[in-house]
Amino acid sequence: MEKQARIYVAGHRGMVGSALVRKLQAEGYSQIITRTSSELDLRNQAAVADFFADERPDYVFLAAAKVGGILANNTYRAEFLYDNLMIESNIIHSAYKTGVKKLLFLGSSCIYPKLAPQPLKEEYLLSGYLEPTNEPYAIAKITGIKLCEAYRSQYGCNFISAMPTNLYGPNDNYDLNGSHVLPALIRKFHEAKVNNLPTVEVWGTGSPRREFLHADDLADACFFLMENYDDELFVNIGTGEDVTIREVAELIKEIVGFEGELRWNTDKPDGTPRKLMDVSRLHSFGWKHATELKDGLEKTYQDFLTNEVMYVE
Ligand code: GFB
């Protein structure tokens, strides 16, 4: 991407979009186009078409999405399907209509079948049934991949897709009903420490395994793919290493300095037993993550302490 290129980052207020903006600014890009959701409702086809016709971005990072943890996915099933389908369809179609040079669509590791062999290779897409708690979100994200492939094959658009593993970092969602496990546990352990509580509730059995990637590493990988990757097949982005929820809960407990007990609530769902990405293709292109989980969590706890008022308001 030329330094003067007009780059639209959809979803710039979110954890991924804000990491992309930081990365692009650090690389010296000055024409970064953004819109808040109140300025532009990405579910509105006509509004998105007008925005693209007016702004004419050269490149698009599609990081806007309705996202959340296991409970939010399972509760707001209609919104997770409808909002994400509309956002993707509107942006991808308008990018085609206005001649965007390249677009990167961001999906999720939940696109893979619940019981797919591990680690998850890109070719396992659509080889089995999905995890029920996030099926609507996964179907929307699979549709995004298929839109990019279809616009590439029918119209020759250079639209690529990246599938990140579970993410964490600055500007994450700390609302306990909507969040993913890491921000939830950072907040719960912190509040329990401050209030001298004896226990912290953790969901499920603790046995599911998850892989976690820092949002700054994801932004770095997306930038790398935008610069170096032009093929149809989507690319997994992760660390290639996973831990059990019990292990990561113990790690966060230690980082925060909470001295009480964990209480496992098995009325809450475990979700997929394991979703470890096979990142050998990404590694073969020359990209590898830089932030190890413990360091990333320490940094994230510091960020939480700095921005607690904003995050838990
Ligand atoms: O991060 P999480 O909500 O998402 O949950 P998924 C991961 C695991 O952590 C589950 C457990 O086994 C949860 O039961 N867990 C333990 C908790 N304590 C907590 C807690 O306090 N809050 C939360 N949220 N979890 C989502 C998908 O699945 O991951 C999305 O629903 C998306 O579609 C996203 O793919 C990356 O990894 O299970």
Image (cartoon, rainbow, N blue to C red):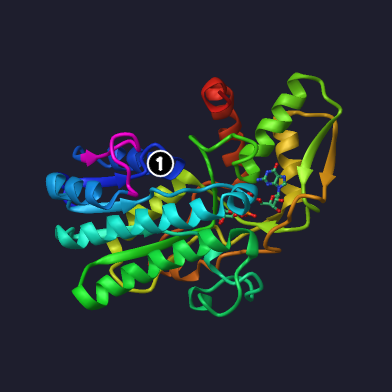
What is the x, y in percent for residue 28? 23, 39
Q: Which residues are magenta?
A: 32-43
Instruction: Please tell me in which quadrant of the rendered image residue 19 appears.
Output: top left
Q: Is residue 109 at least partly visible in the picture?
A: no
What is the x, y in percent for residue 72? 60, 47
In the displayed structure, 51 sits above or below 260; it is below
Between 105 and 90, the residue placed more toward the observer is 90
| Residue occupying the point 33% across, 34% down | 38
| Residue occupying the point 20% across, 37% down | 30
- On the picture, is 302 further left or further right than 189? left
Between 126 and 167, the residue placed more toward the observer is 126
What is the x, y in percent for residue 171? 48, 35
| Residue occupying the point 28% across, 65% down | 159
Q: Secondary structure at mark 1?
A: helix
Residue holding disc 1: 19
Answer whether residue 107 is magenta in the image.
Answer: no
